[in-house]
Image: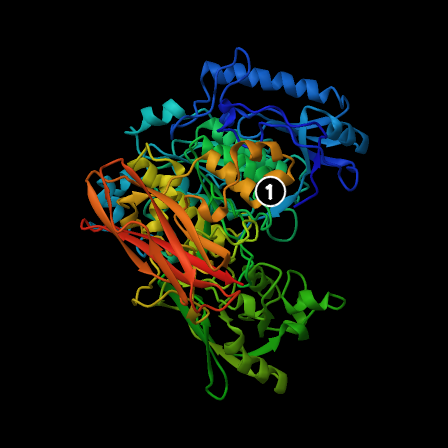
Amino acid sequence: MPTTFRSRRGAAALTAATCLAALTMAAPAAAEPDVGPEAGRYIVQLAGEPIAAYTGGEPGLSATAAEGGERLDTDSAAVDRYRDHLADLRSDALATAPGADVVAEFDTVFNGFTADLTAAEAARLAEDDRVLNLWPDAEYTADTATTPRFLGMEGDSGVWQKQFGSVDHAGEGVIIGIIDSGFWPENPSFAALPEPRPDQSIIDAKWNGECVAGDESASGQVTCNNKVIGARYYDEGVEYVADEYASPRDYHGHGSHVAATAAGNHGVDAGDMGTVSGMAPGARIAVYKACWRVGASGCSLRVSNGVAAIEDAVNDGVDVINYSISGSTTTTFDPVHLAYFNAAAAGVFVANSAGNNGPGSSTVAHNTPWITTVAASSHDRAYEATVILPDGTVATGAGRGAALAATEAVLSSEVGVTGADPVAVRQCHLGTLDEAKVDGRIVVCARGANDRVEKSLAVYQAGGPGMVMYNVDSAADDVAPDMHSVPTVHLTIAEAAPVLALLADSDGPELELTAGRQVTAKAPQMATFSSTGPAIAAGGDLLKPDITAPGVDVIAAVSPASADGENFGSYQGTSMSSPHIAGLAALLIGANPDWSPMAVKSAMMTTAATLDNRGEPISRSGEKANPFNYGSGHVVPSRMFDPGLVYESDPLDWLRFGCGTGEVQDLGYADLCEAYGPLDASDLNYPSIAMAGMSGKQTVPRTVTNVSDKTSVYFPIIEAPAGTKVTVDKTSLTLRPGQSATFYLTVTRTTAEFDEYVFGSLTWQDLNGHQVRSPIVVQPVK
């Protein structure tokens, strides 16, 4: 996390009225930064709660924070008055730096502004009593036929039919905000829904957004309809490529893919890829373009623009936000996570991608309890193709292209443009292959750096009829059947070995590529790229990721501007798994509009599966996976609508969690922690249980609430982590509808090795078919 420069003002007095507010309500304790601030763009946090967290206390200004699971009412008179109050405070603070170039102002989920400051202006603001924190702006990148059948959504017995009467009604009344790279409005996944809309009055009552066409020419602007009901864009401080659109129109393709996965229309013809559908096809979409193509590939988001997008999404009235953008692994209290803290407090469900930095440990991002962090795994549709060597050896990989008869092949390193970077040539970057040297041969390219489909485009542009792509990194040894410009087979390190050996020992050998064929695969399997726990930011005492969903070979809408004119494409990444969860959350909210974001999260987590479609444990790279890979397991939509029990938590719990990790004090809020007390992350009322650094034994509390319409008696089923003993202080729980009960779970080390993590579970089971499962993760220490 970038250095935070803090004011030296002493902490303000606390009252009971401030218990709900987040870290925005008390001034920090004295702190001396190691170095002074430099000139640059800063996110400035001001004293005083934002609208989503204000619980009263200012003379003449009523509370604005949502109460008891209700949604934030951004149209109320109280909000208008408090918004004006914050604007006055902001103006007063800016008087300290009259030359500051303010590029964005925040008041709903974050109280402050973004500004370009000189070093002197930044220093003056850091000293100002009205300023809590200054964060230097930073950048993060995107974490990048259909999955509904695999998830049990389709058919007469599927989720859409059983829960909503038909697919047409799945997601009605719910708005999903997509903070990403925009959308391609002409894609049929975003076509207008049939009129009249049965949920129109619900949408009208909460929607406050707008459709910003953009500053582009007419061809680059966007229009909205009753499917994509709003669109905005945020490009302050971004130097994007010349072909980008200064509008919500998607150049990169990532945002279109994410939006269509979450809530794209049902039954859309994707050509040879089949038909596609989003998880919540009846939901509305609001687009917030904050991720931009700034180089040859990938898209980049400035933190200040991300906060601005979150702010607008909550004000606009979205129910769900998907954020498939990378983030910090070491902090839970930066501007983005503070904004999401207050978004969740306002009643908005937030899904974030876990990151694509696996398989190494402690690579998972977004380690906050108020966000649902999503890992990536495979689904059961795969495309297989092979490379046949002259001696009959067969190398099997992924591919969906046409067959290619035996053709001379060459390593890309042998056919590079004179003077080109050797690494770029090896990886087949655009413009690095010499057409005269390629001379109609299959080109064998290394994976890495540039997009996989860019490699085949480079081969095509150089006149190559086919490509073999091989993996080079054991940490990214999965294969993907992308839509390539030429017939392509993607090989793992092991499968590629004989091909590379042949090319090294032979002059101009011929390779044959077979046509891709669809096969039913063992699934889910964890993607090797999916980031894993234990979570650094919570010291291993909060299990992350929370859950896994399909994120490999996901077909959805893309931008033809960067996909060689194609409207659909196959992507993989936790960017693709997160919108599955966002869309499913929209379905849960549509069916249970009074549920809190934490109840929605709990329902998905406690009903998740840890076995694959063959009844075997979910695997990762051929080995048994564990909760650090998949959290609670793989989402099972058919179970989540009737979870039986849920684990709830609220903003005060999250604040005390931050005190327990020490981050709140590090930001200068020691007095706040003294007032409300720290909460050990293990003790947070979370659907999973994690105990890192457990010495001897440890007891944690949990509270469950019956969300079914029946009184039920639940009994505990314990699978103790190896080398431990696990007990629960209640032999049963009898709960009426809406009733809650607290229990205590104790883990005692017996023979478990010190400093090693072991895994188990606690399941509360009743006679009505409910199985409420929580993973247990324990690390005994001396």
Of residues 203 and 336, the one drawn nearer to the viewer in this rendering: 336
**Residue 295 as seen in the image, left or right of residue 195:** right
Q: Residue 496 location in percent, x, y?
A: 53, 77
Q: Quadrant of the C terminus?
A: bottom right
Q: Is residue 516 visible?
A: no
Of residues 300 and 113, the one drawn nearer to the viewer in this rendering: 113
Of residues 505 and 597, the one drawn nearer to the viewer in this rendering: 597
**Residue 351 as seen in the image, left or right of residue 174:** right
The residue pinned by badge 1 equals: 663
Q: Does 329 sit above or below residue 290?
A: below
For the point 30% across and 67% down, which residue is it? 614
Q: Residue 107 location in percent, x, y?
A: 57, 25
Q: Residue 758 location in percent, x, y?
A: 44, 64
For the point 59% across and 38% down, which residue is it? 664
Find numbered disc 1 in the image and state the secondary structure of the residue it sits on.
helix
Task: Sort mark 1 into few (<14), some (14-19) or many (20+) by Cα contacts within 10 Å.
Answer: many
Q: Quadrant of residue 171?
A: top left
For the point 52% across and 10% down, which residue is it? 60
Q: Does 265 sit above or below residue 216?
A: below
Amino acid identity at mark 1:
Glu
For the point 58% across and 72% down, which residue is it? 443
Q: Residue 214 location in percent, x, y?
A: 57, 31
Q: Residue furthest right?
A: 120
Q: Is residue 574 visible?
A: yes
